[in-house]
Amino acid sequence: NNNFTTKDFLKAKMDGRKITMLTAYDYPTSKIIDQAGIDCILVGDSLGMVVLGYEDTTKVTVEDMIHHTKAVVRGAKRAMVVSDLPFTSYHTGVYDSVRNAARLVSEGGCKAVKLEGGEDFKDEIKAIIRAGIPVMGHLGYTPQSINIFGGHKVQGKTIEGARKLLKDALALQEAGVFSIVLECIPMRLAALISEKLSIPTIGIGSGVECDGQVIVIHDAVGLYRDFSPKHVKKYACVGDIIEQSAKDYINDVTNKYFPQACNSYKIEDEVIDILRG
Ligand code: KIV
Ligand code: NA
């Protein structure tokens, strides 16, 4: 069995091998990146922005997450699929947290869930793990709290901020998470946290010393063109390819270059002759 599991997260850290993670929200993308050899696929609530066109992640529902998780799970053979618990699905108590996490697993089919926040969420994390669901943490810039952050992206620059992040990371490890996403924290702080933890950190905008990296696929391939943050590396311009394809198609149809005979179906001449009478 070649499937990537939470055990492989820990093993990768011990072996000093970087963990690779990308987001996906649909079957074809999931299948492509799984075949490319990605370790872990995140059905992120970034879904709200890059797929559903909302301004931020706060409108994403558990139903949205289940719907897209199902599609991603169908495409992933080797990669481990992790789904985000969306906005307020784990903020109204331990019962709701376990219930919503369980829905992502039993209805969606993912193998683990991710939630944003530090030691405030210890009880929820422990209860979800007790239900048999591995939890991934998420610290630093946590997009569901966009209305609290008010524009400030990079977290943990001050001594209080940095100390709080380290404390939260240790609290999450203590609560039993198998890994922690560190989003937009200074690289030297991410390195320090990664060194202090025995579980792997997965960085996004947090430098090369994290134990793995994650990036939103639409940013990585240039499919989401509204904006591109500094921490993104663009590997392709798929949006430009789609736009040019659409223009070529429009031109072909308008000028009757498409479809050609090879794109069309044949019938015996006599059938048409008979119909003509
Ligand atoms: O929703 C998401 O895509 C994420 C990653 C950027 C970590 O949470
Ligand atoms: Na997310």
Image (cartoon, rainbow, N blue to C red):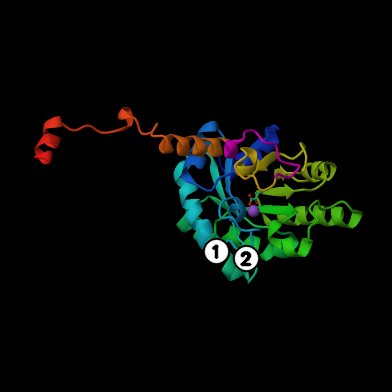
Dominant secondary structure (helix, strand or loop) of the stretch shown in magenta = loop
Label number found at residue 90: 2
Q: Which residue is mark 1?
A: 100
Residue 165 image-quadrant placement: bottom right
Quarter containing the C terminus: top left
How many residues crowd mark 2 within 10 Å: few (<14), some (14–19), many (20+)? many
Is 240 above or below relative to 100?
above
Q: Is residue 257 above or below residue 110?
A: above
Q: In the rendered image of this protein, does residue 172 appear above or below residue 241?
A: below
* Element under disc 1: helix
Alpha-carbon distance for marks 1 and 2?
A: 7 Å
Q: Position of residue 224 (x, y in %)?
A: 62, 45
Question: Dot 1 surroundings within 10 Å: few (below 14), some, or many (20 or more)?
Answer: many
x 11%, y 32%: residue: 270
Residue 238 lies within the magenta run = yes
Magenta residue check for 264:
no
Could you tell me which secondary element the residue under label 2 belongs to? loop
Region rendered in magenta = 228-240
